[in-house]
Image (cartoon, helix red, strand yellow):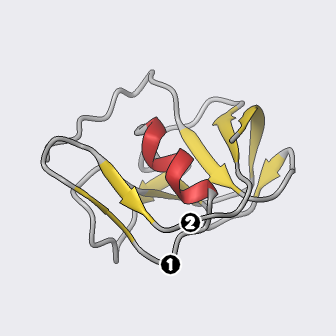
Amino acid sequence: MELKIDPNGIWYHGSNMVFSEMKKGSTITQWKELAEAFSHKPSLLSYDDNGTIYHNGTEKGYLYTIDEPITVGIDIYQHPRTVMDKNAEFLTKRPIKVKMVCEL
């Protein structure tokens, strides 16, 4: 599956915790449904060629958006050990402010 990054697009983070700032090394994505799935803390997660996500997570989750300007290569970088397609996961290089969008 091909994922394109929009430099001005929305970045998401899914978590089962409430906070206003992510730690350095947190995972973010522009794929909203992936962040939603990760918020439920699955031990297994996969997706098909059409982008349908399957996971076994059951925890209550929260969806966040990044709440400050970020730049690929400066503030975030490609996850070096991901098993997902290119551009699916990025890691933060520093703490980053977030805004809760919804409870899942």
Q: Nearer the viewer, residue 84 or 61?
A: 61
Q: Residue at x 70, y 30 (%)?
A: 68
Label 1: state its secondary structure: loop
Q: Amino acid at mark 2?
A: Gly
Q: Is residue 89 visible?
A: yes
Residue at horizontal 77 percent and vertical 35 percent from the top:
100
Q: Which residue is mark 1?
A: 43
Is 19 left, or right, of 98 in this rendering? right
The extreme right residue here reads 19
- Give the x, y percent position of residue 63: 66, 40
- Relative to 15, is 38 on the left or the right? left
N-term-proximal mark, 1 vs 2: 1
Position of 77 with respect to 64 (left or right) is left
Residue nearest the observer in this picture, 70 or 59:
59
Q: How many marks?
A: 2
| Dot 1 crowding, Cα within 10 Å, few <14, some 14–19, many 20+ | few
> Element type at marker 2?
loop
Q: Taking 64 as reference, is 34 above or below it? A: below
Do the residues bearing badges 1 and 2 touch, measured as CB atoms within 8 Å? Answer: yes
The extreme top residue here reads: 8
Q: Residue at x 34, y 51 (%)?
A: 53
Q: Is residue 21 left or right of residue 59?
A: right
User: Residue at horizontal 71%, vertical 51%?
Assistant: 61
Compared with residue 84, is residue 68 higher up or lower down, i.e. above or below?
above
Dot 1 amino acid type: Ser
Q: Residues within 10 Å of mark 2 (few under 14, many from 20)?
A: some
User: Disc number at residue 57?
Assistant: 2
Visible residue check, residue 74: no
Q: CA distance from mark 1 to mark 2?
A: 7 Å
Q: Quadrant of residue 86?
A: bottom left
The quarter of the rendered structure image containing the C terminus is top right
- The image position of residue 98, as x and y in percent, is 75, 39
